[in-house]
Amino acid sequence: MTDYPHVENIEQWKGQPDEYKEACRKLVISHAINELYGSRVYDEPAIALAPTPYAKWLTCRVVMEEYGHHYRFFELGLEMDIPEEEMLPEMTSKSPLSIMTLDLSTWEEFCVIKMLGDLGEILHVEDLVQCSFLPLRNLARMTMPEEHFHSEFGKNFCTDICEKENGRKTIQKAINDIFPHLPSFFGKSGSKNNAIYRKWGLKKRTNEDMRKDFVERAKGIVEQLELTLPEVDLSIYDA
């Protein structure tokens, strides 16, 4: 038995406590902004970086799906009466995730950000597929297979690159440069927002639990490539 609502549609959502509604808004806004921002600064430019027609074709699929993720969250936000300017990076004062400020300029870096960055997104979506707000849960369930494809896309291309001369060294350098920025994807330990999300059944896990899980999963992935993660001090995220 749970002590939070089971909200099946927008009309039921409108009748929920203000704290619940605001928590749902925050989640939708965050995903709408970051999916669009990431599509613009990483995914779409990567088409030009992709080295072969096959790689460009698969990258185009990634781009299409990432823009699609934004559009799904954006449409849900409109149904929730969230002003569209709050869900568009160029029109809101809300900053995207800090990982979005990384300056990626090579195909190898893009493949690493897909392999590990989208792994982080998978963990976030795993919580949403169980959330108490069913429109958001259903959206997450549509998104999940595509997030898995994006991370696998990155891993497969990183594997191919590692088989080439100096490829393993190039991918290891990209991991060393990028990975230290990724644990911030999960916010601060002891987050008040996260506590509210868990209170209302919108998320299941604490930020610190998700961050620890992410590091362990990322470690397992890079070890399959016979590579390593750089040391990162996770205590800097403690509130």
Image (tube, rainbow, N blue to C red):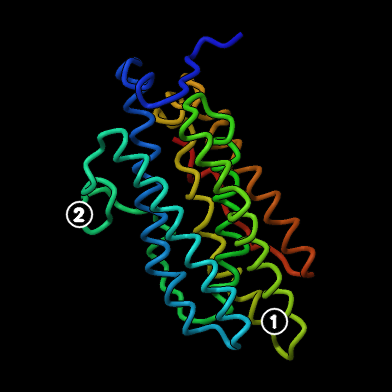
Who's the residue at 73% across and 60% down the image?
Answer: 221
Q: Which residue is mark 1?
A: 161
- The part of the image, by quadrant, that contains residue 68 is bottom left
The quadrant of the rendering that contains the C terminus is top left
- Classify 10 Å Cα crowding around label 2: few (below 14), some (14-19), many (20 and above): few
Q: Which label sits in the foreground, 2 or 1?
A: 2
Residue 224 located left or right of residue 34: right
- The part of the image, by quadrant, that contains residue 128 is top right
- Residue 91 badge: 2
The quadrant of the rendering that contains the N terminus is top right
The three-letter amino acid code for the residue at tag 1 is Ile
Residue 105 located left or right of residue 233: left
Who's the residue at 73% across and 79% down the image?
Answer: 160
Q: Position of residue 188 (x, y in %)?
A: 45, 39
Q: Position of residue 185 (x, y in %)?
A: 48, 49
Q: CA distance from mark 2 to mark 1?
A: 38 Å
Residue nearest the observer in this picture, 27 or 104: 27
Q: Is residue 7 above or below residue 86?
A: above
The three-letter amino acid code for the residue at tag 2 is Met
Residue nearest the observer in this picture, 23 or 226: 23
Q: Are marks 2 and 1 in contact (CB under 8 Å)?
A: no
Q: Position of residue 64 (x, y in %)?
A: 48, 65
Mark 1: secondary structure: helix
Who's the residue at 55% across and 66% down the image?
Answer: 113
Q: Is residue 168 above or below residue 86?
A: below
Residue nearest the observer in this picture, 49 or 192: 49
Mark 2: secondary structure: loop
